[in-house]
Image (tube, helix red, strand yellow):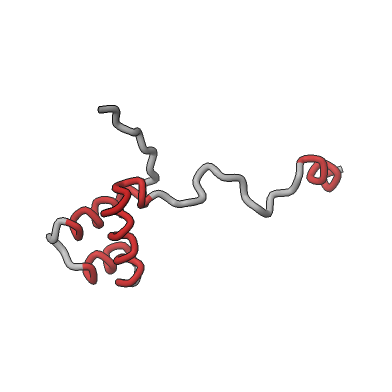
Amino acid sequence: MERDRITMSQKELARLRVVTLASDGHITVREAAGRMGLSPRQTSRLLGRYRTLGAHGLIHGNRGRTPSNRLPPELRQKILE
């Protein structure tokens, strides 16, 4: 079986460690929320995504996408002139 390679930021790696502890029952959702600086509700959402999608569920959804407010290159060049 081929394994997918995931690139994660330091923040996402820290979240993965805490979410894994919570998912395994070593810490409570409330304690995990405190460690990550999130609300218990948001932590529950992260846990759900982790249980459904694995580590991929903790990666920011906009990764690799162009920002919707990005200016077209022609307009940007015109502004800089």
Q: Is residue 44 above or below residue 55?
A: below
Q: Is residue 13 above or below residue 5?
A: below
Q: Is residue 57 left or right of residue 34?
A: right
* Identity of the residue furthest to the left in this view: 26
Instruction: Residue at 25%, 28% (x, y): give it.
Output: 1
- Indicate the position of residue 23 as horizontal and vertical percent values: 19, 58
Q: How many numbered marks have been drawn onto this rendered protein structure? A: 0
Dividing the picture into quarters, in which one does residue 9 lie?
top left
Q: Nearer the viewer, residue 11 or 6?
A: 6
- Indicate the position of residue 22 as horizontal and vertical percent values: 20, 60
Instruction: Residue at 62%, 50% (x, y): give it.
Output: 67
- Indicate the position of residue 43 as horizontal and vertical percent values: 31, 65
* Identity of the residue furthest to the top in this view: 2
Q: Is residue 34 left or right of residue 27?
A: right
Q: Is residue 49 above or below residue 73?
A: below
Dividing the picture into quarters, in which one does residue 15 lie?
bottom left
Q: Is residue 39 left or right of residue 63?
A: left
Q: Nearer the viewer, residue 55 or 9?
A: 55
- Indicate the position of residue 6 as horizontal and vertical percent values: 36, 38
Q: Quadrant of the C terminus?
A: top right
Instruction: Residue at 74%, 48% (x, y): give it.
Output: 71
